[in-house]
Amino acid sequence: MAGFRLTTKVQVSGWRFLLRRVEHAIVRRDTRMFDDPLQFYSRAVFAGVVVSVLICLGAA
């Protein structure tokens, strides 16, 4: 339990932003995030997963 660290929501949000920025820089070769199409893609994937889970639960 000595290695367990608590993090705040701000730290987690900052980490996610940095990961998204690095991914954006690798894909688009630009670190400026004027528009972030990857964010919309990840939201669409998440929404698709939620809809498919609801359909599977409804069919059961």
Image: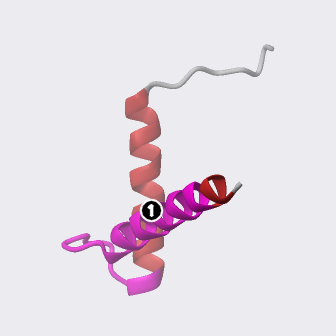
Front residue of this view, candidates 2 and 47 = 47
- Mark 1 element type: helix
The percent position of residue 28, horizontal first and vertical second, equals 38, 85
- Name the outermost residue toward the bottom: 28
Query: Dot 1, how many residues are within 10 Å of its Cα: few (below 14), some (14-19), or many (20+)?
Result: few
Which residue is rendered at x = 76% and y = 21% of the image?
3
Q: Is residue 52 magenta?
A: yes
- Name the outermost residue toward the front: 59
The percent position of residue 41, horizontal first and vertical second, equals 41, 73
Eyeballing the image, is 5 above or below 51? Answer: above
The percent position of residue 53, horizontal first and vertical second, equals 60, 57
Q: Predominant secondary structure in magenta? A: helix
Q: Is residue 19 left or right of residue 21?
A: right
Which residue is rendered at x = 36% and y = 66% of the image?
39
- Name the outermost residue toward the right: 1
* Quadrant into which the C terminus falls: bottom right
Which residue is rendered at x = 47% and y = 79% of the image?
26
* Quadrant into which the N terminus falls: top right
Which residue is rendered at x = 39% and y = 85% of the image?
29
Q: Which residues are magenta?
A: 27-55
Q: Amino acid at mark 1?
A: Ala
Front residue of this view, candidates 8 and 60 = 60
Q: Where does label 1 land, which residue?
A: 47
Eyeballing the image, is 19 above or below 29? Answer: above
The chosen color scheme is secondary structure
- Name the outermost residue toward the left: 34
The answer to which quarter of the image holds residue 14 is top left
Q: Is residue 49 magenta?
A: yes
Q: Is residue 31 left or right of residue 15?
A: left
